[in-house]
Each structure stands twice: as structure tokens, then as C-alpha cells.
Image (cartoon, rainbow, N blue to C red):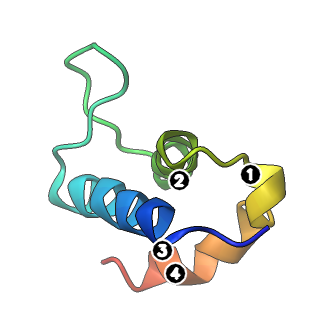
Amino acid sequence: MKMTKAGEKKVGKVMHEFKEGTLHSGKSDKVVKNPKQAVAIALSEAGLSKKEKGGIIGWKSKMKNWK
């Protein structure tokens, strides 16, 4: 399943928040430090599951470029 433009924008926004250290999990004040959790939050907010997106494996190469 391909991601829509809105979904891509949402994932990009969430991953940017993760990179800056401002991504929070749920309503808590805890900052997300695990990249896998950030990907799960991004896909959830974009309305996709990991299975539909091709799993977390496809994101590992992209995560290397976020540093």
C-alpha cells in the first residue's frame, strides 16, 4: 500500500520531532528516545500499520541519515 502525500507529511513531521528530541509518547511528558518507537508513532499517526508500510526494516536505512 502506498502512502498518501498527507501521510508522508505526517511521518516526516513526527520523525523531525524525534530528531530534535521533542517527540512525546501519548499524553505523558516522556520524550521518545527509541527510533523504533518513533517509527511506530509516525505510522500510527499517518494511519498505517508497520505491515502495510513494509515493516520497520525499511526504515533502518532512513534512520541512519537522521543523525
Q: Circle 2 sits on which residue?
A: 39
Disc number for residue 50 = 1
When the figure is inspected, residue 39 is found, relative to residue 22, above or below; the finding is below
Q: Mark 4 and 3 residues: CB-CB less than 8 Å, in contact?
A: yes
Crowd rating for badge 4 (residues with CA inside 10 Å; few <14, some 14–19, many 20+): few
Residue nearer the viewer, 6 or 28: 6
Relative depth, front residue between 26 and 32: 26
Residue at the image point whose x is 18% and y is 50% from the top:
21
Please, what is the three-letter code of the amino acid marked with disc 2?
A: Val
Q: Give the residue pinned by disc 4.
A: 62
Q: Residues within 10 Å of mark 2 (few under 14, many from 20)?
A: many
Of discs 1 and 3, which sits in the foreground?
Answer: 1
Is the C-beta separation of discs 3 and 2 under 8 Å?
Answer: yes
In the image, which is nearer the foreground, mark 1 or mark 4?
Answer: 1
In this rendering, the label closer to the viewer, 3 or 2: 2
Marks 2/4: CA–CA distance: 11 Å
Relative horizontal placement of residue 32, taking residue 36 as reference (left or right): left
Q: Say what amino acid the circle numbered 1 marks.
A: Lys
Please provide percent x and percent y for residue 40. 57, 44
Q: Considering depth in this image, is 30 or 3 the residue closer to the camera? A: 3
Q: Which residue is mark 3?
A: 63
- Is label 1 in a helix, a strand or a loop? helix
10 Å crowding of disc 1: few (<14), some (14-19), many (20+) = some
